[in-house]
Image: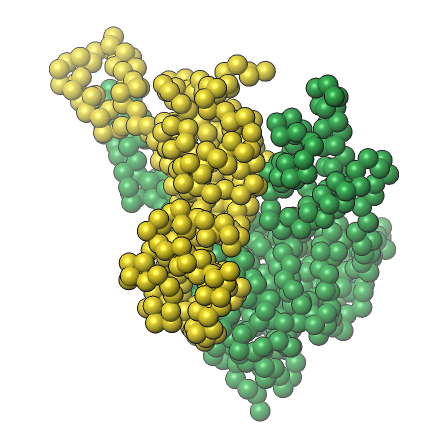
Amino acid sequence: MTADVAADQSERMAVGFSRVLRQAGLRVPASATINFVESLGRVGINERAAVYWAGRATLVNRPEDLVTYDGCFAAYWDRQGGETLRIEETSPPVTLALDLDDDEDDDGSDDADSDGDVQAIRFSRAEILSEKDFAHCSEEELAELGLLMSELRFTTYRRRSRRQVPVAGRGERADLRRTVRWALRHQGEAMQRAFTDKADRPRRLVLILDVSGSMEPYARALIRFAHAAVVARGRVEVFVLGTRLTRLTKHLTSRDPDAAIRRAFPEVKDWAGGTRLGEGLQEFNNNWGVRGLARGAVVVILSDGWDRGDVGLLSSEMERLHRVTHQLIWVNPLKATPGYAPLAAGMSAALPHLDRFIEGHSYASLRHLAALLSDAATGPASATGSAVGPGVGVPG
Amino acid sequence: MNSDQRQFPDSVAPTSVDDVVLALHRNEYLADEGLATAIFLALTLHRPLFLEGEAGVGKTEVAKVLSRWLGGRLIRLQCYEGIDSSQAVYEWDYARQLLHLRTAEATGAITTATAESVEAELYDPRFLIRRPLLEALSPTEGPPPVLLIDEIDRADDEFEAFLLEALSDYSITIPELGTIKAAQPPIVVLTSNRTRDVHDALKRRCLYHWVEHPTFDREVDIVKLRAPGVADGLARQVAAAVESMRAFGLYKPPGVAESIDWALSLAALGRSEIDERSVAATLGTVLKYREDQDRVTDQGLPELVRQAIGRGAR
């Protein structure tokens, strides 16, 4: 075959295969496809292994995608030539009942003449609603709370960075670059000295959401909360934990909460399944947390602490996580229940390794969490060391 | 297209993936087909190679072996938090600049008329401190250098954006001197331990390869190649034991580097076979966490040794 025919073939193959990968959910930008075409030009298209590795080097850039890639490659290569190749549709998009109720919104803006009144009523309603347990909220109420969550402010603990920035006064290091600049204004006389100092940067915030069966009444509201956090500031990571661990950060980055949550849903395959907190945390620690994601970060676990797995494992993984984090916070929706004691095996195993243990059943409590992250940002970190004490006492 | 200035000398560009495998082997690196393909493509398409994987799987070694093979100088940029362009690219030698000004002043060289020329003198290349990136992109004689940007995941994301710019057209602009561009772009290898996600935009510029732990047979070959004094049987047993340790769900599964160290340690103790006592004594060279050592010991060292010997004999 002539070179032109080969080039044409490899181009068609590259474009077609890229499309298959996109259908399967991979992000394949056009530039990657072009790289793939160029690579096929070098390794040829006749050998399965050559094409496979050329595709892996150009079309994939995350190890998580390798399984999908392998599946797609097998399907595409082995059934090549069939123009009608179709990858099985991934599970149909789940429509959420959480969608905002437009009527609610319209009510507020349409009645222009009674604007003040309506607002006042809505305000107090929001106040009542914000205290209400998510488990007792209707769909409409949850939607309204979702709106409120978008307004939450998230600033977190800051830490000293190793990055040097110019400062006005005296700083840690002499800034010779600026000193020389200034000296030039005075014909080389260094009359003023400039300094740099360490910059501040926000600590990473990691949210780990338990979406097991027992957490179902809360999970949707908490995902909404996580979305608000991701959108509000940088350096937030979100994971959900059921029978397995799923990283959700990328799916929540859309500004539109409904779209974000709709995209996130299919990722969570075990929505409302069972929990293995210990194994999930182990996976988190091994693949993400202890390797660096949780180092010096504020990690918030939102879970009721009901674990069907090995409690010893949970305890050791919590200990391991606590060693690398700056703050380890557990938010338990059940904590607000009168007479609650952290007796669930998982919860009592985790308790000794926490910096804070707080409730998270309602909007007000999540607002409190957001505020707590901000307060602590300004206060000394050491003051929070004893925070576990009072909250833990077994009532009655 | 500017293909003419991106051409490598013929001696550098390999002609096939097998070429790469052979050449790397000659230089004491055993690459599997995937890695070899990625390297081949990086060399022929002149793109940076992005290697990600667990610590100790031999990512950094790739840059070193490329430098040995192709003869280009190895220029290493170790990333760390807070690294910025003054440590990665260039910095003016301010102390000498100040000294120069004082000298000019003391000798009465500065007048209103000459002030400008004195200022111009300050931004002379002799006052320039070259950091690794500038060094790699400066025109050189001979084969293009190999630029290793190590552990990019440790640098801040701001620095990534900066790298993206430098790597997209292999040139750096110094306002006072103009644009510096290498006639032959360096061979660029980036490594990451994946402590955080590196931005897609940077990855998109590169060819990507996820480096895995080697298969049993390859690991045996690597150990024999890198630890030539080690007995054949010992190398097989070490590789077998390490392979089963990786399945234990350890905090830090041992990498190839640990296998090599372990084989060398056992050989240094005069062993040509592993046994329970020597394994217990040298466990620290393979497992770097106390919890991991406990776990392996709890699983039973005799069993581990027995299996390793069995596997090694085959």
Residue found at x 75% / y 27%: A9
User: Can you give x and y, in whole percent of width and height, for residue A202 in the image?
Assistant: 48, 52
Q: Colour of chain A?
A: green
Q: Is residue A85 left or right of residue A180?
A: right
Residue B137 percent across, percent down from the top left: 41, 24
In this view of the protein, can residue A331 be seen by the observer?
no
Q: Residue furthest left?
A: B107
Q: State left or right for residue B47 relative to residue A144.
A: left
Q: Which one is nearer the viewer's eye here, A169 or A84?
A: A84
Residue A105 lies in what quarter of the image? bottom right
> How many discs mark residues in the rendered view?
0
Question: Which residue occupies 57% across, 50% down?
Answer: A233
Q: Residue furthest bottom?
A: A396
In the depicted structure, whether residue A199 falls above or below residue B282 = above
Residue A244 is at least partly visible in this image? yes
Q: Is residue B64 above or below residue A205?
A: above
Q: Which residue is situated farthest in the top direction here? A: B113
In the image, residue A56 sits, relative to residue A202, either above or below, namely above
Q: Quadrant of residue B174?
A: top left
For the point 60% across and 63% down, which residue is it?
A: A208
Expressed as whole percent of the image width and height from the top left, the position of residue B100 reads 20, 21
Q: Quadrant of the N terminus of chain B?
A: top right
Q: Is residue A253 left or right of residue B185?
A: right
Give the colour of chain B. yellow
